[in-house]
Amino acid sequence: MTHYRILFSLLVAPLIFNAQEQKIWDVYANSFREGSLPRHAELGFKVASADGRLLYDAKQIKVVKLQPGSPAALAGLKEGDIILSINGQNFNTGILGSELLNNLPGEKSTNIRIVRDEKELVISFVPLSSALEDLSGVTTIYGSLFTDDDIELRTILTIPEKAQGKLPAVLVSDWTTCSSTEVPLKYQRGWVNFIRGIVQTTGAIVLRVDKPGCGDSMGHCSELDFDETIAYQKKALKLLKQHPKVDTTNIFIDGESVGSFMAPLVAKGENVKGIFVRAGGASTWFERMLMFERLQRELLDQSIIEIDRDIKKITEFFHYYLIKAMPLDKIFELHPTMKDVWDNLISHNSESKHYGRPIEFHQQAQKHDFARAWIESGARALVLIGEYDQYESIEASRLLVNAVNSVNMGFAQMNVYPSTDHSFEIFDSHKSALHGYGGQRKIENDLIGAEKPLQDVRNWMKSLYEQ
């Protein structure tokens, strides 16, 4: 099975479907699947740590947010049930159990062994398949891509329905969080609206690739490191360029959040016309992580004295962790006080994960020279950042622009959007933006923060087509 296989069709043409795929085509006139990669299950429930620890460190998981009337609920599953195994496969960490559930296919019998009131039970049910994206104006083709380790990942290719001739193309380089790049209409969030707008309004062929263990992709996102991500994204970009409807002189990359750091590495040597990024930067990873810790403390109203005290300790810890790339247990063995520093980081860490990724992810990122990568990519750059971004700094974005323009004057520009946070949503202050979902939006139920960046991207891409 070749590592360089990608499965997607060019247009709506004579295709061979199995019965399930034909049914999906009948329901979703603009969306269909091809290849053998199954559609992931719509479980009808969520899971959480059963022992109060973070999911990454939990030994067991329990059922939460069970949807009434779902196949799992009708089969007898209840909220609070502790899950012991999934289709006979045991697991010793909560994140592995969660990923096993995420990899379950729809329309196939599933057995979950649970414990309830000290009694073990087996709950059997057939979960539904998750609905496909069904976006107007584009044909959406679900295919697959194999990594160098032969892990099959879901690709989502969209082609404008009425476009003629060769088309520009966009590869989406996505975020750190272990979540799918699908953007169904039911979700109305600023960043979702932005990606949906890229798909529906730029007139470009757009390719997204779901990380291992996300959406339909096989594998485990929690074990995915930085360089592995770069490798499969570079493969996706090469294959996108081979599509006969793609204008290879107008290739773009959309760097979403941490994808903005990956984008120039993916672009190197690929003749990419432009890279537009949401909250991008060109600082070292050490600086980025340290800045994040300071910013969060400032927004949480820590005193300046307390912040300086904490940052000094964190700087020492990051020296061992990121600069020296030492294993955590070795750091704690040689410097016992560093364990308290690790435990008190604002960023989401656990015993063995940082932001849900392995320690190696961050250590590999620190080895990359992002400023040099931006220069060597040869691409023009558009940086989109909110005034109230709670993860990236405007200074880091300005560093990106300055790096590119130091070699190619005028190749890079930065747009700052007032009252807008990391996700292109509107908040009344930087502090309320910090809380994200729980923050008070400046305009209730009005996620207008994504429209202006979208307009700017469309105009910028258009201005580059003839260059």
Image (cartoon, helix red, strand yellow):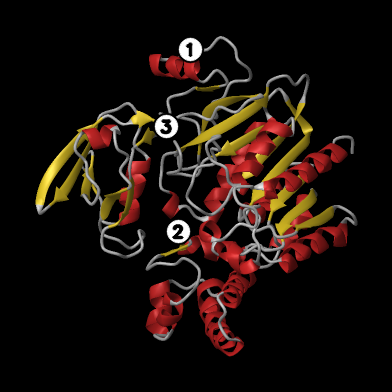
Residue plotted at (59% across, 38% down): 208
Distance Cα–Cα, label 1 vs label 2: 39 Å
Residue 32 appears anywhere in the view = yes
Q: Which residue is mark 3?
A: 130
* Residue 442 picture quarter: bottom right
Which one is earlier in the sequence, the residue at label 2 or at label 3?
3
Q: Is residue 410 left or right of residue 25?
A: right
Q: Is residue 341 above or below residue 253?
A: below
Front tag of 2 and 3: 3
Residue plotted at (32% across, 26% down): 107
Give amino acid for label 2: Gly
Front tag of 3 and 1: 3
Q: Position of residue 77 (x, y in %)?
A: 21, 41
Q: Position of residue 112 (x, y in %)?
A: 21, 41
Which one is earlier in the sequence, the residue at label 3 or at label 1?
1
Give amino acid for label 3: Ser
Farthest front residue in view: 444
Residue plotted at (85% across, 40% down): 464
Q: Is residue 139 left or right of residue 359?
A: right
Image quadrant occupied by the N terminus? top left
Q: Is residue 13 above or below residue 335?
A: above
Distance Cα–Cα, label 2 vs label 3: 24 Å
Residue 269 appears anywhere in the view = no
Distance Cα–Cα, label 3 vs label 1: 21 Å
Q: Is residue 98 above or below residue 347?
A: above
Residue plotted at (72% across, 62% down): 387
Farthest left residue in view: 119
Q: Is residue 144 left or right of residue 374?
A: left
Q: Residues within 10 Å of mark 2 (few under 14, many from 20)?
A: many
Q: Which residue is mark 1?
A: 16
Q: Tags 2 and 3 in contact by the CB under 8 Å rule?
A: no
